[in-house]
Amino acid sequence: MKILHVITGLNVGGAENSLKNLLSSGVFNAKIISLTSNGNVGKDIELMGYEVIALNLTPFNILFVLLRLCRIIKGYKPDVVHTWLYHADFLGGLAAKIIGVKSIVWSIRTTELKKGSYVTSGIRKLLALLSDMIPDKVVVVAEKSKKKHIDLGYQASKMVVISNGFEVGKFDVSPDKLARFKKEIGLADDELVVGCVGRLSQVKGQDVFVKATKIVLKVFPRVRFLLIGRGLDYSNHEFIDVLEKHSNINNFILLGERSDIPTCLKSMDLFCLPSRSEGFPNSLGEAMLAGIPCVSTDAGDASVLGGKNVPIAKVDNHEDLANKLIEILNESQLEREKIGIHLRQRIINEYSLDGMVCQYQDLYTDLDRG
């Protein structure tokens, strides 16, 4: 069976990494099309041996990209076209329908849109109208996201929830590697570290986290805050201004985008997800798999993923978030380690990469038979 994946772009992100993880299983005969550029994730996928084609989409060449998509699909003759993210759902789904592909799958990765996403909001409304005609199945990454999109008008009968899966061995970090990393970024072994992972975005809520840290510092004045993600570095003067206005910049370490996320997570005593909106919160799952105690806002399926051992704060409420962080920091190191062990086991038991791959295999097989 041949699968053609069409995704909006292949820079580092939740959907992009989920596609990469799915392909890493090696069980699929697949080709990948990025509507924009390859990005770092695209390069990783190429190293796995898959062909990746970048179409360099702009607002001015949409028709050209659609026609090229049609040519690629016609030449490849896939059994399934699987699109990822709204723009790819629209263009990839439309091209596949024009060519007459037997099975078309859309993927929805978000619940709420960030402020000002007027074009994406319009595309999402259009997709809701087209969901009865184009896709055979719509894969949703989270239960909250499913409900949201049904409310928007998506065909409920076509929607299936497949949560992300995590590669367990990837988060085994040697003590020597961790020690070198801490030395590199200037962390002492006796310092408490609270961290976040995610690109700088209004949706990801780093501004909420920064405001919460000011309250945390009143109780734990020596705690360090480790921020990792695109845009979270010292060259971003706008974000530096936010730190100086709402907290103490001297307590922060900004690392920007990194490829060694497991090591970064292992250096933390506590992970925080301050998002205003999520689909399925990958970074929370990765922190859990790393064995790190976690606090999250009630974004997407965070409460479902975390279960009873992840305190959930109200969305966009920095005071509640700070109180939840202080609650965990007040625990002994031994108690925090116990929490981390429970969280890691939860991911292994219920959210493994193998389990996710099996669900996609079943989906594609059922569509092929149908």
Image (tube, grey):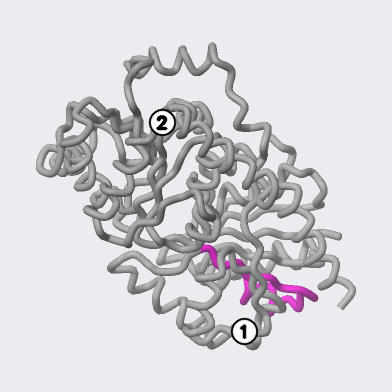
**Residue at the image position 50 percent from the left and 33 percent from the top:** 261
Secondary structure of the residue carrying numbered label 1: helix
Residue 192: which quarter of the image? Answer: top left
The quadrant in which the C terminus is found is bottom right
Q: CA distance from mark 1 to mark 2?
A: 41 Å
Neighbours of disc 1 within 10 Å: few (<14), some (14-19), many (20+): some
**Residue at the image position 62 percent from the left and 54 percent from the top:** 164
**Image height of 28 relative to 76, above or below:** above
Is 232 within the magenta? no
Please tell me the numbered disc located at residue 156.
1
Secondary structure of the residue carrying numbered label 2: loop
Residue type indicated by callout 2: Asp
**Residue at the image position 34 percent from the left and 36 percent from the top:** 329
Left or right of residue 313, residue 92 in this image: right
Neighbours of disc 2 within 10 Å: few (<14), some (14-19), many (20+): many
Please tell me the numbered disc located at residue 238.
none
Residue type indicated by callout 1: Ala
Is 100 within the magenta? yes
Q: Nearer the viewer, residue 91 or 354?
A: 354
Residue indicated by mark 2: 269
The x, y position of residue 158, in whole percent, is: 67, 80
The x, y position of residue 223, in whole percent, is: 27, 29
